[in-house]
Image (cartoon, rainbow, N blue to C red):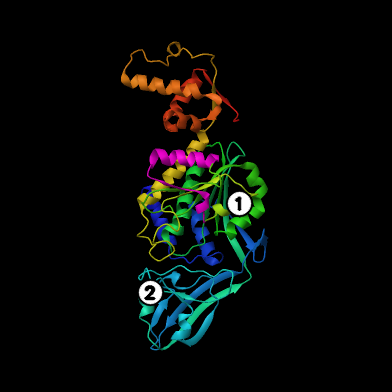
Amino acid sequence: MNLGDEMYQWAVDLFPINRSLTGNGVRRTLAYLNELLADQMVYHEVPSGTQAFDWVVPKEWNIRDAWVKDASGHKIVDFKESNLHVVGYSVPIDKVISLEELQQHLFSLPDQPDAIPYITSYYKERWGFCLTERQRSSLKQSDYHVFIDSTLEDGALTYGELIIPGRSTEEIFISTNICHPSMANNELSGPVVTTALARYFLSLPEHRYTYRIIYIPETIGSLVYLSRNLEILKRNVKAGFVVTCVGDERAFSLLHSRYGNTLADKVAKHVLTNCCPDYKAYSYLERGSDERQYGFPGVDLPMVSIMRSKYGAYPEYHTSLDNLDFISPDGLEGAFNVLRASCDILESNKYYRIKSIGEPQLGKRELYPTVSTKQTKARVRDMMNFIAYADGSNDLVDISNIVGRPVSALLPIVERLLAANLLEEVSGV
């Protein structure tokens, strides 16, 4: 089975599990992913009521069953058919009510009559059901039995953390969300691709950076994590990626950091420009996921979000139409390749300085071809262009962008110049 098919199967297995900010569905999801990671993940349980900056960890929510029955006892809405049918964090209810009262607790999408919306109420206790507009419009005047078997009580917020040490304590930080129920692009694709990346890093015999990978509920999870780890993150993180909405086959999206000038911005832009030039760039003004917290003043982590179809920008978003048919093995594998390439470039991205004064004599070092052709001239031109900007002030991505050649084309040149003792690595300026 190739990697794309393997990731898609993970999504199939995880799709039925009901996830939210907290609860047993999150724990089941983390346990599944941890098994793929050879039990390398560490679980953290943060008690309800814990302060995280201006926020507080909410109560833990779990749900076992829910439905709406008509007067004949027929289930017209059934949580077991789709866990999107229940408003997230609904309190328990078991009563018979009129259609008029029921309508006050129903949510649908008139402009998408065959889609079930994804609705939550994390911070105000209520109950509700979601259904298609077509279902809702077919309801007749009658009494309805509404039933939600849930609990909302003190418990814990659960998140997973995986730290893969490198030669350096400097870190690449990767964050993804595990709080959404059955929506495939948002958000199963994020944890699935992140897990494939983690397995890739674990398989490497060594690497330059330490990789910090977290699986968290959106917003409250990042706030909790920052409240516990901000000092070390600000000290060690060199670049990072929020991995979300990476499963479909539409064009890639890049949401930049607050000022768009971090190493993560530069590397992600380089990779997408060279492999996927039809990608769409978004400014930080169009943020909406955990980059809100990572880029907030006083936090200022050098992070960007790499996506396929950006959250909120595709019609299937936050509906039952964001299903397993919307993502694909090719879509997942394409996102994995872009994120892996970004990390690979970070691993090789260094500052270099040419050691000669004046243009070096390449021929005597066997770096200049003895037969001149169009092809050999192009190779020499790439080398000479690299040398011209290897003054210690540009890193490899900078030089690549200046000379118009991808990093992958410059790496062999770097190796040859290092072997010839014409090049030295310097600390960044």
Residue 111 visible, this angle: yes
> Who comes first in sequence, dot 1 or dot 2?
2
Residue drawn where x is 41% and y is 89% of the image: 142
Question: Taking 315 as reference, is 208 above or below it?
Answer: above
Look at the picture and state if 340 lies above or below 85. Answer: above
x and y, in percent, of residue 347 in the image = 52, 36
Checking the image for residue 133, the label placed there is: 2
Three-letter amino acid code of the residue under disc 2? Glu
| Magenta region includes residue 281 | yes
* 224 drawn magenta: no
Pointer 2 local density, CA inside 10 Å: few below 14, some 14–19, many at least 20: many
**Residue most extreme to the top:** 364
> What residue appears at the point 46 percent right and 12 percent down from the top-left corner?
361
Residue at 39% x, 80% y is 76
Vertical placement of 216 versus 304: above or below? below
Where is 360 relative to 77, above or below? Answer: above
- Is any atom of residue 41 visible in this view? no
* Amino acid under disc 1: Phe
Q: In which quarter of the image is residue 208?
A: top right
Viewer-closest of 173 and 403: 403
Marker count (numbered): 2
Left or right of residue 169, residue 370 in this image: left
**Is there a contact, CB below 8 Å, between mark 1 and mark 2?**
no
- The magenta span reads 261-288
Secondary structure beneath dot 1 equals loop
Where residue 138 sits in the image (x, y, percent)? 35, 81
**What percent of the width, then of the height, locates residue 412?**
44, 26
Which label belongs to residue 348? none
On the image, which quarter does residue 429 sit in?
top right
Residue located beneath label 1 in the image: 296
**Please, what secondary structure does the residue beneath circle 2 have?**
helix
Give the image location of residue 310, x and y in percent.
Answer: 44, 54
